[in-house]
Image (cartoon, rainbow, N blue to C red):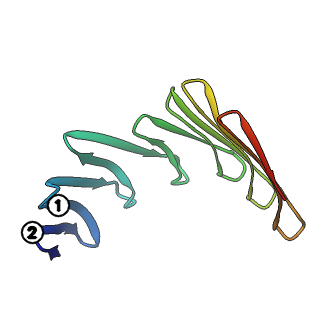
Amino acid sequence: MSRGTNSVSYTYDGKLVTAKELQGVLNSELSFTYNNDFRLTEMSYAGATESYSYDRDGLLTFAGDFSVTRNSGNGLPESVSNGSYSQSRSFNGYGEISQRETAVAGYDLYTSDITRNENGKITEKTVTLGGETHWTA
């Protein structure tokens, strides 16, 4: 596929994309490696390779330096972290996000609390961003 002096080309193994090459303004190549379950296990770009790991249910547990912690009962991702960045989430009984907290280097950057009615519609949301709290109903 090309437009002017820019082009994108793909390499496949069956239906799986194993490489993507960009030529023109941006010259780079991405490569992808998969396991026997067709899940991405490695992605390489600009000389760096990131690995991906999954649990026995096939749910993502690691993406590069980031670990994903899941609820053991339902598999929902409750937290993602890498040491300096962390995000945690709480869910209601329907799997809808009810609370989210994001921190960078120990600094609470963002929090939100969401209240829903019995139909799942958001009725109230409180967001704290950079120390300022905003409320909507």
Q: x, y percentage for residue 69? A: 60, 40
Name the residue located 74 percent from the left edge and 59 percent from the top edge.
Answer: 96
* Residue at the farthest top position: 106
Q: Is residue 54 above or below residue 1?
A: above
First in sequence: mark 2 or mark 1?
2
Q: Is residue 23 left or right of residue 77?
A: left
Q: How many marks?
A: 2
Quadrant in which the N terminus is drawn: bottom left
Residue at the location (24% across, 47% down)?
45
**Position of residue 78 in the picture relative to residue 68 (left or right):** right
- Say which quarter of the image contains residue 64: top left
Residue where numbered disc 2 is placed: 5
- Residue shown at the point (73%, 58%) measured from the top left: 95
Q: Position of residue 44 (x, y in %)?
A: 25, 46
Q: Residues within 10 Å of mark 1 (few under 14, many from 20)?
A: some
Residue for badge 1: 22
Where is residue 20, by image quadrant? bottom left
Instruction: Please tell me whether mark 2 or mark 1 is closer to you in this view.
Output: 2
Above or below, comparing residue 50 to residue 35 in the picture: above
Residue type at mark 2: give it. Thr
* Residue that lies at the very extreme toward the right in this rendered image: 118
Q: Position of residue 73 (x, y in %)?
A: 72, 49
| Element type where label 2 sits in the image | loop
Quarter residue 118 falls in: bottom right
Proximity of marks 2 and 1: CB atoms separated by less than 8 Å: no
> Which amino acid, mark 1?
Leu
Residue beneath the point at 65% across and 35% down: 130
Assign the C terminus to one quadrant of the image.
Answer: bottom right
Position of 106 compared to 29: left or right?
A: right
- SS category of the residue bearing label 1: strand
Give the side of residue 31 with respect to residue 91, left or right.
Answer: left
- Disc 2 crowd, CA 10 A, few/some/many (<14, 14-19, 20+): few
